[in-house]
Image (spheres, rainbow, N blue to C red):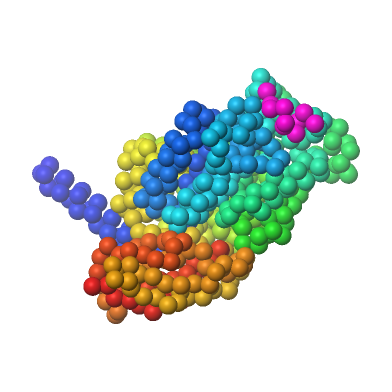
């Protein structure tokens, strides 16, 4: 009886796996956060070991189907890149000095991610400056020049969200990145006004008196954040209209007991505690994706994943993309991966996941990397197209042919700094010409910026072009590899 039971479980598992494979979406955001804050390895490894480490991270993420890396480049008003405005990060070097031997982690990650056909989203924290009262800042930090533009709360230092000059400065930081690096998106996480600490009031009474203009204080604080989001998006789009702006908010907008529109939850509220009205930002078109952090268990008493995934699906993702932030270790520990994938995969407004932290994926915590690479993300997926930024399809690859060593080659127009530039190519493989179906992602064997591909199997191959916002061209002329 025990043997029969085990056999039945194996058959059921295989059946479920086949169903998932058959239903693998062609379009799905599959992101991973790689944070640098509090990560000691980047300072201790040295330049070459850091590069090798990051290459291995990207190789591992690519192998499990991840198509976008959210790399933290501004953890605490400092930089994992050659910033024109802020010192090098204390998590990379000491005293704001440039790394030696010199390298630029953001430039490196853009090149390496793109070489693998992956997107690179530059992740910034807008207001945070220090993480403790004892932390000192490099001499060239803007705080030393304009100390009155900062506030202390619970011993930590922040840019004052009320000040127009701080919004202008943060926009300059973003413009610096967008103008000099070929990033696919700018990403902010959940830290706007700081998470509240019991018994401590945020010190902005004087600013409220000066700028409040009769508004309720909470509405005024939300207005301050609204203005930052709108201004950052405007700055991005003026420079490069194709660069997306994404926000990853805390997972509860408001509780239903506070607002009839809210979710059946009982936790901290974005709208009221962090002053982030993220639904408004989508409604106004100031952002290109929302990525709420639904890190709780499926049936958490105060904040159920099931409840929140359903709530976000009903209240966001209609005009912009909606992805779900997944806590890797909590999900695997509770054996909830299969159930958490269900609302992402069924037809709705949710268009993918982002995994927190990416390091847990690459460490294969609880076999999560195996589950993704063999099952849920077995087939390559293209990120959803951001058609509101441009819906003109790129031209299909031309002059496709096969060289003597069976390498497939093609040509495409040189990028002209346009949204419709072909920047990546998807290669499809089919058993025969009759099998050609570009609507199915199961046949994508590679996504690459190169204009060549060396097949590992015989078959019929078709190549498409992908533009900067993930629109896909028509297919090339098919070629046969024997």
Location of residue 36 in the rendering, given as x and y in whole percent from the top left corner:
54, 36
> Which residue is rendered at x = 53% and y = 35% of the image?
101
Q: In this rendering, does residue 325 appear at all?
A: no
> Which residue is rendered at x = 39% and y = 79% of the image?
477
> Which residue is rendered at x = 36% and y = 75% of the image?
401
Secondary structure character of the magenta stretch overall: loop
From this view, report whether residue 418 is shown above or below residue 34: below
Q: Quadrant of residue 137?
A: top right
Q: Is residue 137 magenta?
A: yes
User: Furthest-top residue in view?
Assistant: 134
Q: In this rendering, does residue 110 appear at all?
A: yes
Between 114 and 243, the one nearer to me in the picture: 114
From this view, report whether residue 128 is shown above or below residue 65: above
Between 461 and 47, the one nearer to me in the picture: 47
Q: Quadrant of the C terminus?
A: bottom left
- Counting labels gives 0
In this picture, residue 388 sits left or right of residue 309: right
Q: Is residue 227 magenta?
A: no
> Which residue is rendered at x = 42% and y = 58% of the image?
345
Location of residue 429 in the rendering, given as x and y in whole percent from the top left corner:
32, 69
Location of residue 373 in the rendering, given as x and y in whole percent from the top left corner:
33, 51
Q: Quadrant of the N terminus?
A: top left
Between 213 and 453, the one nearer to me in the picture: 453
Location of residue 106 in the rendering, given as x and y in whole percent from the top left corner:
56, 45
Q: Quadrant of residue 481?
A: bottom left
In this picture, residue 197 sits left or right of residue 456: right
Q: Which residues are magenta?
A: 136-145
From this view, report whether residue 251 is shown above or below residue 382: above
């Amino acid at each position: 009886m025990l043997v029969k039971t085990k056999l039945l479980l194996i058959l059921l598992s295989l059946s479920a796996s086949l169903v998932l494979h058959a239903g693998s979406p062609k379009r799905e955001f599959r992101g991973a956060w790689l944070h640098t804050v509090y990560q000691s390895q980047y300072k201790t490894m040295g330049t070459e070991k850091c590069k090798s480490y990051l290459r291995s991270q990207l190789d591992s993420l690519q192998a499990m189907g991840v198509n976008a890396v959210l790399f933290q480049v501004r953890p605490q008003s400092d930089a994992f890149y050659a910033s024109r405005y802020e010192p090098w990060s204390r998590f990379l070097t000491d005293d704001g000095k440039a790394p030696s031997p010199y390298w630029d982690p953001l430039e490196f990650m853009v090149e390496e991610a793109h070489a693998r056909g992956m997107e690179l989203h530059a992740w910034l924290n807008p207001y945070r400056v220090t993480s403790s009262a004892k932390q000192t800042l490099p001499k060239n930090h803007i705080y030393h020049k304009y100390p009155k533009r900062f506030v202390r709360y619970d011993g930590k230092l922040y840019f004052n969200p009320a000040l127009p000059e701080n919004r202008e400065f943060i926009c300059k930081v973003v413009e610096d990145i967008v103008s000099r690096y070929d990033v696919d998106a700018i990403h902010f996480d959940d830290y706007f006004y700081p998470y509240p600490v019991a018994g401590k009031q945020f010190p902005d009474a004087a600013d409220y008196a000066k700028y409040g203009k009769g508004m309720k204080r909470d509405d005024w604080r939300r207005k301050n954040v609204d203005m930052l989001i709108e201004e950052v998006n405007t700055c991005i789009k003026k420079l490069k209209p194709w660069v997306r702006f994404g926000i990853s908010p805390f997972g509860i907008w408001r509780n239903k007991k506070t607002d009839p529109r809210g979710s059946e939850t009982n936790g901290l509220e974005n709208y009221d505690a962090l002053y982030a009205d993220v639904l408004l930002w989508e409604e106004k078109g100031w952002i290109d994706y929302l990525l709420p952090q639904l890190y709780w268990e499926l049936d958490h008493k105060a904040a159920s994943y099931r409840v929140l995934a359903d709530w976000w699906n009903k209240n966001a993702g209609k005009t912009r993309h909606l992805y779900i932030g997944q806590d890797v270790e909590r999900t695997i520990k509770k054996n909830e991966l299969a159930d958490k994938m269900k609302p992402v995969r069924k037809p709705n407004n949710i268009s993918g996941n982002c995994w927190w932290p990416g390091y847990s994926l690459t460490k294969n915590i609880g076999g999560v990397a195996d589950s993704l690479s063999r099952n849920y993300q077995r087939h390559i997926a293209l990120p959803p197209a951001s058609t509101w930024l441009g819906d003109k399809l790129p031209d299909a690859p031309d002059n496709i042919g096969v060289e003597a060593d069976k390498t497939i080659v093609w040509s495409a127009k040189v990028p002209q700094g346009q949204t419709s530039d072909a920047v990546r190519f998807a290669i499809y493989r089919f058993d025969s010409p009759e099998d050609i179906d570009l609507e199915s992602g199961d046949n994508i064997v590679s996504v690459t910026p190169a204009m060549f591909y060396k097949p590992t199997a015989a078959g019929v191959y078709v190549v498409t072009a992908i533009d900067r916002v993930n629109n896909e061209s028509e297919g090339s002329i098919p070629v046969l590899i024997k």
